[in-house]
Image (cartoon, grey):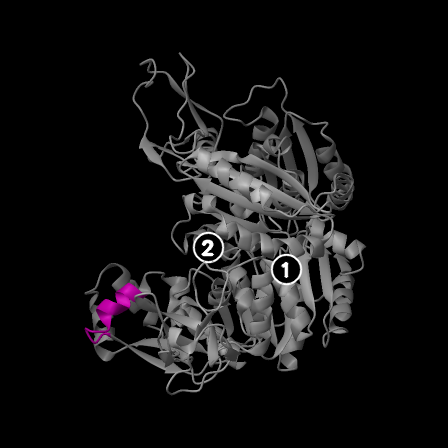
Amino acid sequence: MPTVVRVALPVPLPTLFDYLPPAEGRWQAGSRVRVPFGRGSKVGIVVDPAASASVAGDRLKAVTEVLDPAPLLDTELMQTLAWAADYWLAAPGEAYANALPLALREPRPWPDTRDEYWQLTAAGRSALDAGSRRGASQQLLQLLAPGPQRADVLGEQLPSWRAAARRLAPAGLIERHTAAAVTTPAGAPLPLSDEQQQAVAAIAAERHRFQPFLLDGVTGSGKTEVYLALIEQALAEGRQSLLLVPEIGLAPQTLRRLRERLGVAVEVLHSNLAEGERARAWLRARSGEAKVILGTRSAVFTPLPQAGLIVVDEEHDAAYKQQEGFRYHARDLALVRARAMDVPIVLGSATPSLESLANVAGGRYRALTLRARPAAVHAPQVQIVDVRSQHLDHGLSPALQAAVRETVARGEQVLVFRNRRGYAPVLLCHACGWHADCPRCERPLTLHAGQRQLRCHHCDYRSKVPAACPACGAGALWPQGQGTERLEEALTALFPDVPVLRIDRETTRRRDAFEHLIDGLRANGPAILVGTQMLAKGHDLPNLTLVAIVGVDEGLHSIDFRAAERLAQLVVQVAGRAGRAAKPGRVLLQTHHPDHPLLRTLLAKGYGAAAVSLLAEREQAALPPYSHQILLRADAHERVAVDAFLVAAAAALPDDHSLQLAGPMAAPMALRAGRHRGQLLLEATSRAQLHAVARPWQRALGKLPAARRVRWSLDVDPIDLY
């Protein structure tokens, strides 16, 4: 058999593909190649440059073109991706493709990695003085008036600047040029507390070897200052640091702190970036030029040839788990990379995941704690508000309204937290009981009063609000329950002289909207903030002294075994927004279940005690982290097709008494977007036993006749059994 080039292609198939070597070019593992595939071509990654073919040479096609002068992915990243594809049962080509920015998945040369700058021309300055342009074009001219500006800085200040640049550049009003990254003077570090100094010293002592640390610090205890001190040490040694955050909303403020403090260029990697910017940042990290990289989940794939430190902030956050395609967990993959590169990794959180706490108990992680809030007088006072038998005004109790009134009268700010957007979760006919359901999901449609629209938050189905009940014709249609939109309306009516700002997905659709809203609250005046979990972490509002949490009860009675952990984390994270500066904070938990054990434990002993109790329950029930799971999901337009596939899938499993099988069963949400959904849950106390079965089972599933009539996927270590 001939020697072939083995290539990973971005297709959902659990295999690599063999091609004959190209006529010219130097191909190595980690290089991109363009190859014929079907009737077209695809860009793939060379996994093995000299493999033995499994079929005769006359059946093979040749590589069309070698795209890279040197391997794009280094040995460590190639090995890590191979491991990740195997562990999470992914198609290998999809795993390798995930490691590349979109611009590098195309058959194009590498972009210029120098910084992109824009400046005014003489004609542009005249146009600015004359005020001859309007809208974004005029704004861009104004931004460039002080002098040349970097493209990423323009993007932060004016998200639509590139469209304006495409109008102004051909007119000769602005011009583009490139230059190497410049440094600025580093800012002075804040004095560290004794706890912070001890944490920095402990991690620094292990800076040349792999060691996972769990930095368990209460909200406001200064975890970011610990990160900054450690990154400074890595910079002093010429080594790279990767800092992961769970959401794009946390990136701008963290970026600002990093730049002001470190005085070096900080590269950013997240999905809201223009693809060219993202590719340039990725390539600068690959070359070692970029020393500090900040990013969300996908930034875990950043090349780090001079790695010194990895930090995963808010490590408990579910946003680190990819829920479609290649279903990896960025926190867990960061640990694998840190081991491969032999560097320390810091997992930071005020509410650590139960998995991480179990790893501390098992001696696999080392715990460091921050219990003091250096900038605050003391921790916020937490109080349960019993709303049983009370009259609620749009879901707000009299005690809560009184507390809000007292707070704004002092010139301070309030956060009313409700993790449900829209106006009301149900629209009900008072005469006959009809309620508006999504025809594709059979779940209640949420009323969005501002748009006069009913919307499904599962499949995004939308319809107009009916003028009368479709069932009986009555005109009395009543919104039931409260979303952030309804709370905003109620609080505006109750406090007409106080600014009320709503922060949820609807009000932050523009890329810069979230930061503008947050920046507006950093002033000292009174304000009421209504928000969802977007505000649960990472934001410092020094004048925010009262946090009121409504809707706590929904998380107390869920079929999801992770619901109690998530509720505890959410309550503690939201409560941590109060009293982060010199003013004392106060937190109100509004509930119909004031004696619930979880709430009482959180109130009396804190998150740590609640986590110990939840871990004991998990261990007794043999649930993660004391067992391991793989979830088989299937969906189709016909329920019979889903059921037939799941029955056949269960029959394809080996008779292994070390495994437990739950199902076939309908998914908790049995119908979504018009497709019927079902699942099988495979469990074992041994991860090795579970994976020994998983790959053969995956191959068997692909060969089942019933598989052709459904969409199916395997999710290793699922975090949502939906």
Q: Residue at x 62, y 51 (%)?
A: 717
Mark nearest the camera among 2 and 1 is 1
The tag on residue 332 is 1
- Taking the image as shown, residue 378 lies to the left or right of residue 439, namely right
The alpha-carbon separation of the residues under discs 2 and 1 comes to 29 Å
- Taking the image as shown, residue 140 lies to the left or right of residue 400, namely left
Q: Position of residue 472 (x, y in %)?
A: 33, 13
The part of the image, by quadrant, that contains residue 120 is bottom left
Residue 581 inside the magenta-drawn segment: no
Callouts 2 and 1 close, C-beta under 8 Å: no
Q: What count of labels does the image hold?
A: 2
Q: Position of residue 460 (x, y in %)?
A: 38, 40
Q: Residues within 10 Å of mark 1 (few under 14, many from 20)?
A: some
Q: Which residue is mark 2?
A: 515
Identify the magenta region.
162-173
Q: Which sits in the foreground, 179 or 694?
A: 694
Residue 663 visible to the viewer? yes
The amino acid beneath tag 1 is Asp
Q: Residue at x 64, y 33 (%)?
A: 589
Q: Is residue 395 above or below residue 50?
A: above
Q: Residue at x 62, y 17 (%)?
A: 389
The amino acid beneath tag 2 is Glu
Disc nearer the start of the sequence (2/1): 1
Disc 2 is placed on an element classified as: helix
Q: Residues within 10 Å of mark 2 (few under 14, many from 20)?
A: some
Q: Is residue 464 above or below residue 122?
A: above
